[in-house]
Image (cartoon, rainbow, N blue to C red):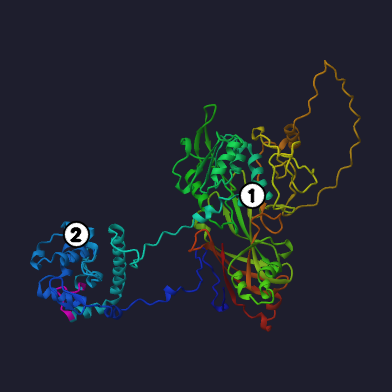
Amino acid sequence: MSVHIAASAISANYEQDDISRSSDASEEDNKELETFDDWIEEERPCKSLFDDNVLDSVTLAIEYDSKTHGFDIGAVSKRLGLDFLQRARLINHIRKEKPLAPELASLTGKEPFLSDDALLKPTLEDDPLLELDIPGDSDDDDDDDEIPGAATSTGPAKEKNLVKKVKKLEAQLKEAREAVQQMRQLVQGRLNLLEPDSGAVAPQAPRDDDSHYFNSYAYNEIHATMIQDTVRTSSYSKFILSNPLIFRGAVVMDVGCGTGILSMFAARAGARKVIAIDASDVVTKAKQNIKDNGFEDVITVIRGKVENLESLPDDLPYVDVIVSEWMGYCCIYESMLDSVIVARDKFLRKGGAVVTGPDGEEETKEEGLMAPSQCRMMMSLGETFDIIRERVKFWDDVCGFKMTSMAEEVYDEAVSEVVKEECMLGEAIMVKDIPVQHITIRQLDFVSPFTLTTTRSGELNSFIVYFDTFFTTDGKDLAPDAKVELHKGDWAPGEVIQIGRRNSEGADGHRRQRSVDSAGGHSRKSSRDGPPPVEHGTITGEPLSSVPESVSPPPPPAPPAPPAPPAPTPIVGILSPPVRRPSLRARSASRRGSTAGLPKSVSFSTGPRSMPTHWKQTVFLLREPVRVRKGTTVSGTFHCKKSKDNSRELDVEIHYIVNDPSLTEDPADEEGSPKEMIVQMFKVR
């Protein structure tokens, strides 16, 4: 839904930690508490504890027993310090055993029947005396004047006093009813006294936000989609395989390991130990994948949540690197980053740790590394007519029928679509910086101000959110103006990346093909052959076209050198040494030259200006599109927090004002008057 707020009511300042909770008031919030009069109306006839007289109310029954038999249930409960359940047992004991009132004068509160759960079953069916909360329990010692039927107060005076304290009694009434319900459930659970169809309400099961999430990762399709995402997989492999100084001899943890591919990258890069953890059923296949590739001695697979992992295997004190592909739609959807942060705080090496090297010398280590080390949520203005046409206008006429009601929910939920670059109405800005090395879980709920400016005219009908990801070699925060690498090309969803293989179509081919042996089967290169040549962000040895956000034109090509004279053909005979071609690894190392072995940072973008990824972009469609001119500013705040209904989903609010400078310059222009702020709420799920 969307809401309009008058300009005069808009505050200029926004508290960064104050998450807006604009939403429809719940039905519960609108209900008024029951009044004391309502409580009085619910009084029912009550039988005396000691004879067959039935009084008109619980209050009168207590007064009758006090005056006639000299027994005041409220005063006795207070004197013995009985809680609600103990008082219920005492009432049921009296009704069942029928002792005389003087016999109860010697009660000490330690009698066995006061802890007998069998006495929680009402002796008198629907006994109203059991449902009354009598102030005078062990936690209400200060309320002597509120005990119904206490000898210190007369009936009219007591009632007048209760009316004065109606608010407190209303709260006590609510607590009493909850206690009665708990007692009924306790009886059902311990003694099995209630029939299945008795109408008793079973205790509500604790909410489970995890089962569906982990089950969704048990199937092949989702893992194939992620691995076939060239930008994603090649970026991870490039960072791991081209940084031996970081991974060789390191202890690595892979949080949410899935098929185990990142763990195997780390093992191939020379990691001493890799701990792969995942709570999904896919870990069974991950173990087999790891065994099939000969890494079972290096990689240990653990099934479960990292939050429940108390210690590392093999008595390891810490891990040196944590790798994880935790990003979801809109970057933080699915809340997997929470688990990564827990793993970081529990197991990542702290700065200043002293370790003993292979030569026996002690060395002080810096803080361990998170990969990726930083993400940035970006936001831009959108003119996304294709999405409007497919998801909204489609319902205007379906086989001659009007079904526009089907499109209503489109505006309440963010959609995940690939947005073309030309659909952007201006440059994107960062709305949330996520330094994975030190961000806290609490900081993932946030409010961020923004100001976006159009660079062309058009119809503003959406906000577009995506994220940029950075793998740095030192884990330090990036400079605010750091550029992300943009990968160019078209993503083919069916494309399968062949690790360590050359492109069968050559350097100019766009689609990687499987290598097929003479028998028609797929050949598999042993994972023990060492890391494949990695160049330009690929894991196949072929360049992945990529450019930074701002590039200068390439220098003109140098004139071709004159051809060298042909080398003499060697005479090959039985005494001649064999002629060996340089190995693929040697040729690759020669091409890399002096940069070999140096730390290499990697980045990628999921924005419209880069090669599409399986994350696509998150599009927030506006209920009220607006025509904008070049130079129009859209300012407001972006509110994002975990959903209270499901912690893996997001609740997003976008508060914004559209200001057209060409209109506001003329104070006489009616359209130049102060604009209303529009608030629109979305679910990301």
Give the numbered dot on residue 145.
none
Residue in front for this viewpoint, 19 or 258: 258
Q: Which amino acid does label 1 sit on?
A: Ala
> Where is residue 467 shown, x and y percent of the image?
63, 56
Q: Which residue lies at the image location 41% right of the left edge and 60% below the top edge?
A: 205
Q: Which numbered disc flags the more N-terminal residue, 2 or 1?
A: 2
Q: Give the range drawn in magenta.
A: 146-155
Residue indicated by mark 1: 224
Main SS of the magenta segment? loop
In the rendered image, the vertical position of residue 105 relative to residue 543, given as above or below: below
Relative side of 277 to 199, left or right? right
> Where is residue 28 shown, x and y percent of the image?
42, 73
Distance between the Cα atoms at labels 2 and 1?
Answer: 63 Å
In the rendered image, the vertical position of residue 504 relative to residue 579, given as above or below: below
* Residue 157: quadrant of the picture: bottom left
In the rendered image, the vertical position of residue 185 relative to residue 348, given as above or below: below
Q: Which residue lies at the image location 19% right of the left edge and 66% below the top edge?
A: 91
Instruction: Find out whether residue 148 is within the magenta segment.
Output: yes
Q: Which amino acid does label 2 sit on?
A: Leu
Give the numbered dot on residue 114.
2
Q: Is mark 2 on a helix, strand or loop?
A: helix
**Most extreme residue toward the left, as rendered?**
102
Q: Quadrant of the C terminus?
A: bottom right
Relative side of 162 to 509, left or right? left
In the rendered image, the vertical position of residue 649 relative to residue 410, given as above or below: above
> Where is residue 294 shown, x and y percent of the image?
60, 34
Q: Which residue lies at the image location 19% right of the left edge and 62% below the top edge?
A: 81
